[in-house]
């Protein structure tokens, strides 16, 4: 009985650690739009500018460039741009170098566990002794998902790069020269000399990836899109009767929040911004860009109650 309890407890822990690679994710290729409306760069750029100004942040990338990355990546992965933009707002306030007290980084606030899950879905593992792709007890994502993501990254997403190429971080020149190994102890030889014994340092590698995510807005947005769509694919599998909005609410709550209070805030503020963007887009279409008087010009989406994420 005790063994059964421990086994069930381990499953519960795993399910709370983004181990979605454990499940079938063939639904990853499903288009996941909640609103039948495109989000224009003009509307999102205005929202990003206002957010950065009120939070006194300044990016090294222009707001219109960031807006283009978010909308184009949303289109590449066929996720809803309004909800995805709202989620990025709450996670980082569109500040590229944002780092939370819990060391989540970048626009999409990637944690160490989230980075490992994304790489699992991409088909890469950390560590020389892992026998399968995946981080969680040697479990692996489906090969179909790996192939689908690769097709998106090397096709649609690559067009956003200046060189029109997408290169996985582990394929970059010099990656294998990173400090993969760390001295764990010294072994004494019969001659009295000390020979260092090395071990694989996954934590060090993840930290280097976090530094890259804070410097590369496209990479950060892509990683966030992969993680969100992975959770969405899982929701589609276990909740076949949900509407698309319900799938998004389920997924957003599990994206990067641990407590119920944090999940409530993430869901509420993500959709508050999503609906504000949607209203602005509809006003632009109906009234024209010179007559927009919608909620984007109203300070309510930027009010103090959502002025700081607690992730």
Image (spheres, grey):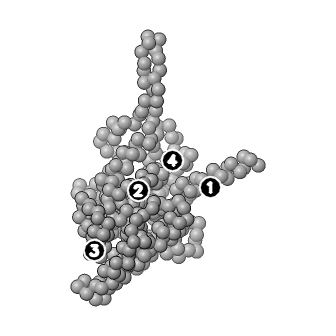
Looking at the image, which residue is at 31% across and 80% down? Answer: 297
Among the two numbered marks 1 and 4 on one chain, the one whose residue lies closer to the N terminus: 1
Give the alpha-carbon distance from disc 1 to disc 2, as whole Å: 26 Å
Comparing labels 3 and 1, the label whose residue is closer to the camera:
3
The residue tagged 1 is 12
The reply to whether callout 3 and callout 1 are in contact (CB within 8 Å) is no
Q: Residues within 10 Å of mark 4 (few under 14, many from 20)?
A: many
How far apart in space, not on screen, are marks 3 and 4 (Cα)?
39 Å
Disc on the earlier residue, 4 or 2: 2
Q: Which residue is mark 3?
A: 46
Q: Position of residue 112 (x, y in %)?
A: 45, 50
Q: Is residue 206 visible?
A: yes
Task: Choose between 263 and 8: the one closer to the eye.
Answer: 263
Q: CA distance from mark 3 to mark 1?
A: 42 Å
Select label 3 or label 2 by which is in front.
2
Vertical order, 264 against 290 (above or below): above
Q: Please, is residue 270 above or below residue 20 in the view?
A: below
Identify the mark nearer the N-term, 1 or 2. 1
The residue that disc 2 covers is 100
Q: Earlier in the sequence, mark 3 or mark 2?
A: 3
Tell me the SS state at disc 3.
Answer: helix
Q: Residue at x 39, y 45 (%)?
A: 207
Nearest to viewer (mark 1 / mark 4) = 1
Labelled pair 4, 2 in contact (Cβ < 8 Å): no
Front one among 76 and 83: 83
Q: Position of residue 308 (x, y in %)?
A: 40, 65
């Amino acid at each position: 009985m005790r063994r059964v309890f421990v086994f069930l407890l381990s499953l519960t822990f795993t399910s709370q650690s983004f181990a979605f690679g454990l499940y079938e994710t063939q639904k990853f290729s499903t288009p996941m739009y909640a609103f039948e409306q495109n989000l224009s760069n003009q509307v999102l750029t205005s929202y990003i500018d206002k957010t950065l100004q009120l939070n006194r942040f300044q990016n090294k990338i222009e707001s219109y460039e960031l807006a283009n990355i978010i909308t184009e990546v949303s289109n590449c992965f066929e996720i809803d741009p309004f909800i995805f933009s709202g989620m990025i707002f709450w996670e980082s306030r569109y500040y590229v170098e944002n780092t939370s007290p819990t060391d989540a980084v970048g626009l999409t606030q990637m944690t160490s566990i989230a980075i490992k899950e994304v790489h699992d879905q991409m088909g890469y593992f950390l560590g020389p002794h892992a026998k399968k792709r995946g981080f969680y007890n040697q479990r692996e994502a489906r090969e179909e998902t790996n192939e689908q993501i690769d097709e998106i990254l090397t096709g649609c997403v690559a067009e956003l790069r200046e060189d029109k190429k997408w290169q996985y971080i582990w394929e970059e020149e010099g990656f294998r020269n990173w400090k993969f190994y760390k001295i764990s102890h010294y072994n004494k030889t019969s001659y009295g000399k000390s020979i260092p014994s090395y071990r694989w340092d996954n934590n060090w590698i993840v930290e280097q990836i976090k530094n890259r995510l804070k410097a590369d807005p496209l990479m950060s947005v892509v990683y966030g899109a992969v993680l969100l769509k992975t959770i969405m694919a899982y929701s589609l599998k276990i909740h076949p009767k949900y509407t698309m909005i319900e799938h998004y609410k389920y997924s957003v709550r599990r994206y990067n929040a641990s407590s119920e209070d944090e999940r409530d805030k993430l869901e509420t503020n993500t959709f508050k911004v999503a609906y504000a963007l949607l209203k602005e887009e509809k006003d632009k279409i109906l009234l024209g860009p010179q007559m927009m008087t919608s909620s984007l010009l109203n300070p309510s989406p930027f009010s103090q109650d959502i002025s700081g994420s607690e992730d």
